[in-house]
Amino acid sequence: ACSPPVLSPYLTWPITWCTILLLTWSLRFVSSERLTSLPQYIRVVPKMFPALALSVQKLQPAASLPWLSCLKRAYSTSGAAAGTNWFGHVEMAPRDPILGVTEKFLADKNPDKINLGVGAYRDDDGRPVVLESVREAEQRVAGTHFMEYLPIGGLRDFVTESVKLAYGDDSSVVTNGQVAAVQSLSGTGSCRLFAEFQRRFMPHSTVYIPVPTWSNHHNIWRDAGVAQKAYRYYKPETRGLDFEGLMEDVKNAPSGSVFLLHACAHNPTGVDPTPEQWSAMSKLMLDKSHFAFFDMAYQGFATGDCTRDAAAIRTFIGDGHRVGLSQSYAKNMGLYGQRVGCFSLVCDNPMEANKVESQMKLIARPMYSNPPLHGALLVSKILQDADLKQQWYQEV
């Protein structure tokens, strides 16, 4: 220990009280959340008011004021030593099983490498492809809109066209105003919004997820705090659908359960039920009062026909179900980086749909406030223009 400088008795206390006054005045500039204790305050003040160091270093510690000695030590130590290590316990997260493949692909120097991670349009040389219909839509919307915030529910034209694409232009639930819908951050965002909606408004339900499924489904419902169970889907022995096992699991699930269904082009197997199997699933789920939530990330990919790929949803609606739906344009329009999708719930009447949609917006607000504009403009332009829509149908 070193001996402190000895000051004249006539100077020690004036300096002490001046320091106290300065410290009191500095309290006005330090966030109250950080002042949970005096030692914590003493650690914060030296970083914010280094000019105080001069007077503090001249102080001769007094037994009657032990905290001044503590303050002097705070000024004498480095910021790193005096601060708290908030994140030292944080461990490295595991790689995402899908996006992690892309990371490895980018790091690989082999000229013959092939990316088997995220599915995306590529030409014969492995380069990204943008659909001609999308390029034409880009040219038409360029410079035509301001960059203002969208409403929480997104671009209304986009939502309207998305609902019609999924349920059908002449669907009774569409024409009667029974669909509550908002623009979302692609398919992931749609699923996340529904998972949170399920937690809040279907609190005693469990979500049944197929085996196998897109790996992020488990993350989404886990982070929403919703209980998960599995149901049989794929049969490795036949490389096909385990329809008997699926129906048995649907039958044995408690009434009022939520079933996550891939509307078409099941990820990752590519195995879809036949129209007859969809019809049988719909009737059994209706008898059990189950709720069907469809994830439709590949409309147009399974058969090349967007109408046929939406047949399962329309079968359930025709049987009287009230369903939920996640739509994504990442794959079928190649708008991967635009993060554009739609989340919808079919309700009993327009009044109920308005209430449900208000809650959907309430959930979205603290998550991301409002969705992005550009991708929604592109989709709206393609779906509203008959020629562009036909061109897109042909490209898909």
Image: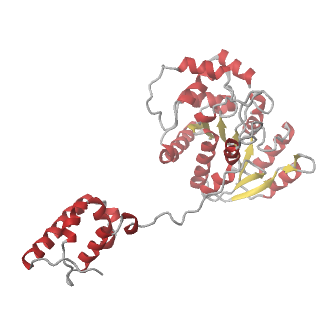
Q: Nearer the viewer, residue 328 or 84?
A: 84
Instruction: Report whether 231 appears left or right of 46.
Output: right
Q: Is residue 197 depicted above or below 128 in this figure?
A: below
Q: Position of residue 355 (x, y in %)?
A: 52, 43
Q: Position of residue 72 (x, y in %)?
A: 26, 72
Instruction: Report whether 358 appears left or right of 41.
Output: right
Q: Position of residue 25 (x, y in %)?
A: 19, 62
Instruction: Report whether 41 appears left or right of 204.
Output: left
Q: Is residue 259 depicted above or below 297 in this figure?
A: below
The residue lying furthest to the right in this view is: 238
Q: Nearer the viewer, residue 286 or 375?
A: 375
Task: State how many labels appear.
Answer: 0
Q: Nearer the viewer, residue 330 or 314?
A: 330
Task: Evaluate whether residue 209 shows in this view.
Answer: yes
Quarter holding the N terminus is bottom left
On the image, which quarter does residue 139 sit in? top right
Quarter holding the C terminus is top right
Residue at (58% x, 53% y) in the render? 201
Q: Position of residue 221 (x, y in %)?
A: 64, 54
Q: Is residue 56 depicted above or below 329 in this figure?
A: below
Task: Evaluate whether residue 340 shows in this view.
Answer: no
Instruction: Report whether 112 appears left or right of 9.
Output: right
The residue lying furthest to the top in this view is: 387
Residue at (27% x, 80% y) in the render? 2
Q: Is residue 369 depicted above or below 142 in this figure?
A: below
Residue at (84% x, 41% y) in the render? 273
On the image, which quarter does residue 7 sit in? bottom left
On the image, which quarter does residue 228 sit in? bottom right
